[in-house]
Image (tube, grey):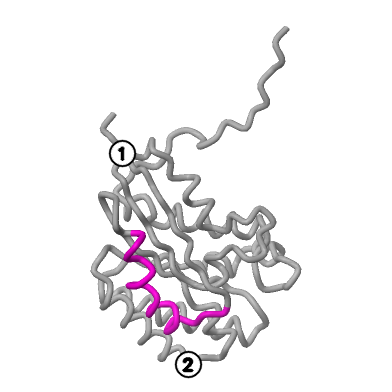
Amino acid sequence: MAHPRDVRVCVFGDSFVAGVGDPKALGWVGRVAARTPPSTGVALTAYPLGVRGEATEEVVVRVPMESAPRFARGDEHRVVLAVGVADAHRGIDPARSAAALEFGLSSTSVPTLVVGPPPVGDQPMTVRIGELDAAYAAVCARRQVPYIATFGPLSAKDAWQEARADDGIHPDQAGYGLLAYLVLNGGWYSWLGAEPPKTPVKDRRVPRAAS
């Protein structure tokens, strides 16, 4: 087997990137990284760079400075932007958030992937997130940047509505698992140029005691 490519990925966003609410402290980023072992052809280093409460316009300005030291080594460098929930929570105009995303994409020279915001919060906030999802998707289509939508797929899932941390906004362990599933099956491997793993990443079977 060829030597795995040394790929460094910086994942920028808000508290959902930081994994707030997950008792295992993995979030969706950790789960996606766990499903990208060296057998995929990629030696992945994933940096979760989420800041709780930051909107898109605050996230994108961090990208150049915070990615630079993490991109000092490695064969390939990539960026993931996963924003929007904080924008909706703060009531920021979707057009303003979309413009900030476009600015961020235009100022990034490495391959970039955008993960859309999931449906959370009360009904008015969910409506705002739906508007953001559409606006972000349009920006990515225009710039030919891959976009993984989570709003539509999760809106119809009862399991998502029940997978809530104590604050009622962030996902719990099961919710982050659903987000990771959507990312992994929404184009993650093709974006990395990796082969999906054919076997479980970790064998969880308990070994038998020697007789």
Q: Which residue is mark 1?
A: 4
Q: Amino acid at mark 2?
A: Asp
Q: Nearer the viewer, residue 131 or 83?
A: 83
Q: Which residues are magenta?
A: 53-70
Name the residue located 55 percent from the left edge and 35 percent from the top edge: 202
Q: Is residue 85 above or below residue 12?
A: below
User: Extreme right residue here?
Assistant: 166
Residue 178 screen position, x and y as percent = 58, 57
Inter-mark Cα distance, 2 to 1: 43 Å
* Quadrant placement of the C terminus: top right
Closer to the eye: label 2 or 1: 1
- Please give the label number shown on residue 86: none
Name the residue located 39 percent from the left edge and 42 percent from the top edge: 196
Image quarter of residue 43: top left
Mark toward the start of the polypeptide (2 vs 1): 1
Secondary structure at numbered mark 1: loop
Residue 20 screen position, x and y as percent = 63, 66
Residue 130 screen position, x and y as percent = 51, 80
Q: Nearer the viewer, residue 145 or 38?
A: 38
Q: Which residue is mark 2?
A: 93
* Quadrant placement of the N terminus: top left
SS assignment for the magenta stretch, majority: helix
Residue 22 screen position, x and y as percent = 66, 59
How many C-alpha atoms fall within 10 Å of the one at disc 2: few (<14), some, or many (≥20)?
Answer: few
Would you say the residues marked 2 and 1 are in contact, meaning their CB atoms lie under 8 Å apart?
A: no
Secondary structure at numbered mark 2: loop
How many C-alpha atoms fall within 10 Å of the one at disc 1: few (<14), some, or many (≥20)?
Answer: some
Image quarter of residue 72: bottom left
Count the marks: how many?
2
Name the residue located 59 percent from the left edge and 84 percent from the top edge: 89
